Amino acid sequence: MATFLYKLGRTAFRRRRLVALLWVALLALAGVGAATAPTATSSSFSIPGTEAQRAFDLLEERFPGAGADGATARVVFKAPEGEKMTDPAHKAVVEETVAALRSGSDQIVQVTDPYTAHAVSQDGSTAYVSVSYEVNAMELTDETREALTRAGLGAQGKGLTVEVGGDALQTMPEQGASEAIGIVLAGIVLVVTFGSLVAAGLPLLTAIIGVGIGVSSITALANVLDLGTTTSTLASMIGLAVGIDYALFIVSRYRAELAEGRTKEDAAGRAVGTAGSAVVFAGLTVVIALVGLAVVNIPMLTKMGFAAAGTVVIAVLIALTLIPALLGFAGDKVVSRKQRKAAKGGEGAKGGEAAAGAGAKPNGGTRWARFVIRRPLMVLIVGVLGLGAIAVPAASLEMGLPDDGVKPTSTTERRAYDALSDGFGPGFNGPLLVVVDGDKATADRTVSTIKGLGGWAAVTPATPNKAGDAAMITVVPKDRPSSAATEDLVHDIRDATGDDVLVTGATAMNIDFSQKMNDALVPYLALVVGLAFVLLTLVFRSVLVPLKAALGFLLSVVAALGAVVAVFQWGWLGGLFGVEQTGPIMSMMPIFMVGVVFGLAMDYEVFLVTRMREAYVHGQRPGEAIVTGFRHSARVVTAAAVIMIAVFSGFIGMDDQMVKMIGFGLAAAVLFDAFVVRMAIVPAVLALLGRKAWWLPKWLDRILPNVDVEGEGLAASADGPGAARPDLVKV
């Protein structure tokens, strides 16, 4: 593989104008496709195989036009102290609001009058208007949302406290600012790492091109493949992350090859042949993790995974072709001004090699690696115990989907949530919808059965459909939607009723979603880690190194989950991260972290350890190989990790609790994996194992193909046409 990629890199360097033109053409083509494609709609969220989903399907069949999976909103009115919502003046304001809502949008299915729908609290202080829409929240138009907000504001100025809640106000979080902050921070780190604006700009430029092609392609194909508006979110985040990482490693290796006195073309070829081989396999591990999301069997997650995987493939191809092409355009400016001055001062190949060799002043990576191999057992114990202690809270993990109750009190959704809880009880924010597949007698028996259970605050009479063969029953729990008591009530209703009675609604859907995520976690882990183990065995030609990589990854992910539980579920340091209300951890968080962090962790593992393997294959002793790997790779791995932490940390400052949780969890996981597992535990374990780390059974060695990731085949050409020549060192 290294030989093939070496030729590819040299070809891209020589034909740089053609390569650059092809990628610009692809970007333009994808952009035109995205601009001319019909506006994407949001696919209905579905969870195949769950009771809540079967109930929704039954509702759509038996209650056509009811908008079973449509968005909802509640406009909550609160009277001033000492007054009631039944006062004539307040009643007139509410009725005006109802009329304004009904005429505000053609996407509305129903607007209820609180005075005829018994939606006034017992003490008369609170009332609410329910609004139902025919489409889900992501498909609501801006005009519809503005009409809802305008109706609330109109009543606000007439002596009442008015707040608006419900998923109708839900929008995709604005990511532009967070991504811009991440790109700026990445640029700063790259400039510090390379000491050259041109070298720092190449990874940013190519990552943006890759994300642009990927996201534009997703937008262009959205209607054809029913991708929906949320599909590009993960693709954008991961594409930016790996795009910067892959380009960073190839540019770094190119500069190292130049420092050894190689011609620019040969340096580009060798950078792609060695670091590019690592990029290919690192990219494959990310693709495995993302495509593996299909195991969960939730269409939305599957589409997001495949779209993100496609963007990663684009990032790999750009790193292998566009980067060497742009290096050809960059010329001498790809190295720092200090190095250019040194070259002009007459330092030859020998000086460059000395600077890169063992005789040079040890850099930070060299000093750290030597410290670890002197005290490997101590470093291993401290690293494992430290992450183990942070992971302890993960044992108390409670999964669910955060609702409006965890939003900041500055939002109208949170204030509406609190007002409904105060006026009608905490369970009112998460009513259960019971669907009966049967006649009125069956529905009445179901109502009686539910009333015989505990945990409910109200049970409405059954509402039959026109045909009389189905009915709906609303059950209001006593406790808040995300509580364990409400989950128990859902299970109690399902256990006490027959197969013709189904429980759904947002609360039941969240419970089923959490259960499906929990059930899929072990199979997903087994698939991703298993396939990656095979892939890494092929790369490193070792059994113990892939095993160590997988175990280290699991340790860092569990530690990150422990940190998430401590902050978002227990409330530790919650004020520091803007967590105003604790609650369950988002159901998809464990699987999401496994998928994203596994890919990034294996990136760092491949880039760091392949350089050690390369040194070992070329004759160095195990300890020397560890030091060599750190001398060449620690700086860029550190830079890549800092960039990722900066990108993910940008999301912590957002108001949306789920986005904040994702940003914190991913930043913590990268921090633990890069700086504790890869930088400390990995060299400690390799130092303790010595030559045994690279052991591979002979029968397996014969079976596995030799992919030559280390570039051993290129070593034979060290004295060939591209070898170091003093007259070409001035880069």
Image (cartoon, rainbow, N blue to C red):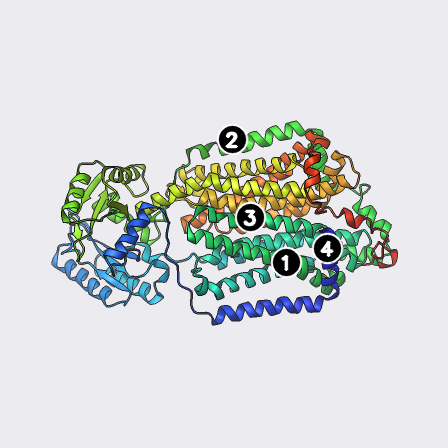
Of labels 2 and 4, earlier in sequence is 4
Quadrant of the image occupied by residue 309: bottom right
Amino acid type, mark 3: Ile
Q: Relative to residue 3, is residue 586 drawn left or right?
A: left
Q: Are marks 3 and 1 in contact (CB under 8 Å)?
A: no
Q: Nearer the viewer, residue 590 or 299?
A: 299
Q: Nearer the viewer, residue 147 or 463?
A: 463
Say which of marks 1 and 2 sits in front.
1
Q: Residue at x 36, y 62 (%)?
A: 139
User: Marks 2 and 3, how far apart in space?
Assistant: 30 Å
Amino acid type, mark 1: Leu
* Residue 400 % position (x, y): 37, 43
Q: Residue at x 49, y 70 (%)?
A: 35
Say which of marks 2 and 4 sits in front.
4
**Mark 1, residue position:** 317
**Mark 3, residue position:** 288
User: Marks 4 and 3, how far apart in space?
Assistant: 23 Å
* Residue 395 % position (x, y): 44, 32
Q: Are marks 4 and 1 in contact (CB under 8 Å)?
A: no
As helix, strand or loop, the secondary structure at mark 2 comes to helix
Quadrant of the image occupied by residue 27: bottom right
